Structures are given as C-alpha cells and as structure tokens.
Amino acid sequence: MEKKLATGDIQFFPNQTRGNMTNNPEATNFPDLNRRDFLRASTGATLLFAMGGFPDNVRAATVHTLPPLPYAENALVPVISANTVSFHYGKHHKGYVANLNKLVAGTEFADLSLEKIIDATAGQAEKTAIFNNAAQIWNHTFYWRSLKVNGGGAPPAALKQKIEASFGSVDVCKKELVTAATTQFGSGWAWLVLDGDKLKVVKTGNADLPMTKGMKPLLTIDVWEHAYYLDYQNRRADYVNAVLDKLINWDFAAGNLGS
Ligand SMILES: [Fe+2]
C-alpha cells in the first residue's frame, strides 16, 4: 500500500499568505540550522496583492520565487562549471518557478505552499504539469543545498553511524548512490533517504521525489542532463563521482536526519 506524502517532514518553504505575511523572513521559527538556512535561501513564497494582473477572484496568492543560490555560481568549479550552474539555476530552476506561477494563478492551488501543491497534485494525471513544476522547484532547491564548497569527505559522526548501520560503510552508501544515479534511465534524481528508521538510496524519474512514497530525503544528486552535460557530456558517472568526492554536503544530510 502506498505511503502517504510526508508533508510534515518537508516544510522547507514558508506558506506566506495575506494572513501571516511578514517582512522578516527570519521571523518563522524553524528548529534547526538547516531549515533556517534553507528558509533564508528560499524567502521564496511572498505575497502578491492582486495588483491588477490577476482576476478579481484571486485575492491573495502565494507567489513562488527563485530562492538564492547558497553560493556563487562559480563556487563549485572545477567539479561543476559556472556556466552549468548559470544555466541550471538561472534558466531551468528559474523556469520551473515561472511556469508554476502561471499554472496555479486563479486556481485552487494559488494560495498553497509549494509542499501543499506537491501533496495535492502527486499521482494525479490531470495535474501533472503543476506537480512537475512544483516538485522541480523543490528538488532543485534541495539539490543546491546538497552541495557545498569543499564538500565530500567523511559524514558527521551521527550520520556516519547511521550510514554504517544501514549500508555497512560510507563507501557502500556512496557506491549505491553512484549506481542509482547512473542507472536512472533518462532524467531524474538519486537520493539518500530515511525510510522508517533505516537509510536507503533511491532513484526517482523526472520530477518525482521521495516524499510521494513517504520517505524523507536527506540529500540528492540531479541526474538530468542539464546538470552535467556542458561539463561531462555523456559521462554521467564522472559527474556523480566527482560530486560525491568533492561537493556532497553531508552536513546538510545530517541536519535533515536530525530534524
Ligand atoms: Fe536540474
């Protein structure tokens, strides 16, 4: 039986509507650093007062905006070029935000947070376009946070212990991530997730994400071609291995595990 979407676990974006809008993005109280950082990076959903551009029935809509990158576009060089980040973030990620705002304007989804839109549209064929764009916004914001300058190395102790209990060793976990990332046919994502009390590696196709299967994501690697093709062409495995060795943000994963 399909598990329910664990929306309670994925409240990385604030749902700001007219009733709770604040000019201070720090005002929302998140329990841990990662969520706080993520919120800061996603001051995202801001209120639109119907300023003439929307029909009268759209009183107040949640407008999704592109969260800032947590580092400079050239910060991931030489593993991921500034050119790739510029297109990936500035065109693809930004494009999903623009598409979602167009798709939900004037609909029942206009006032919903990103997570609620994902929750409400997952698995519904007639809502695929809304789901895809909402999930891709969420996935990409999570992906940028899954990478950091001088990443890789050893995970923090608590996460390392959990990885060893679930996989036997960090190396096995990394190998499973490489396998998931390189065997995902076509576009998609490789994830380290918490499923019950165990860590697992899973892959999802296109825009799909682990929450639709009740799993809590800890980190992700984007394996859409736009994530690596300018730098690695068809060598997806080289991109994934380099990300795991040099950029992967175990601290982010540890924070998600503990939250
Ligand atoms: Fe992507």
Image: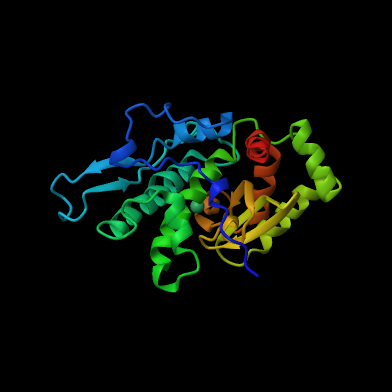
Q: Can residue 196 be seen in this view?
A: yes
Q: Nearer the viewer, residue 126 or 16?
A: 16
On the image, the x and y values in percent for residue 109 come to: 34, 57
Q: Quadrant of residue 224?
A: bottom right
Q: Nearer the viewer, residue 190 or 227?
A: 190
185 to 74, vertically: above or below: below
Instruction: Work out which residue is located at the far left of the displayed protein and give it.
Output: 52
Q: Which residue is drawn at 31% across and 60% down?
A: 108
Instruction: Work out which residue is located at the far bottom of the displayed protein and give it.
Output: 125
Instruction: Work out which residue is located at the far right of the displayed protein and give it.
Output: 168
On the image, the x and y values in percent for residue 207 come to: 51, 60
Q: Which residue is drawn at 60% across and 59% down?
A: 234
Q: Nearer the viewer, residue 127 or 234?
A: 127
Q: In which quarter of the image is residue 133?
A: bottom left
Q: Can residue 73 be seen in this view?
A: no
Q: In which quarter of the image is the N terminus?
A: bottom right
Q: Which residue is drawn at 38% across and 47% down?
A: 94
43 to 242, vertically: above or below: above
Instruction: Work out which residue is located at the far front of the displayed protein and give it.
Output: 19
The answer to whether 225 appears left or right of 165 in the picture is: left
The answer to whether 185 appears left or right of 100 in the picture is: right
Q: In which quarter of the image is the C terminus?
A: top right
Q: Residue at x 50, y 31 (%)?
A: 71
Q: Nearer the viewer, residue 110 or 178?
A: 110
141 to 186, vertically: above or below: above
The answer to whether 39 appears left or right of 171 in the picture is: left
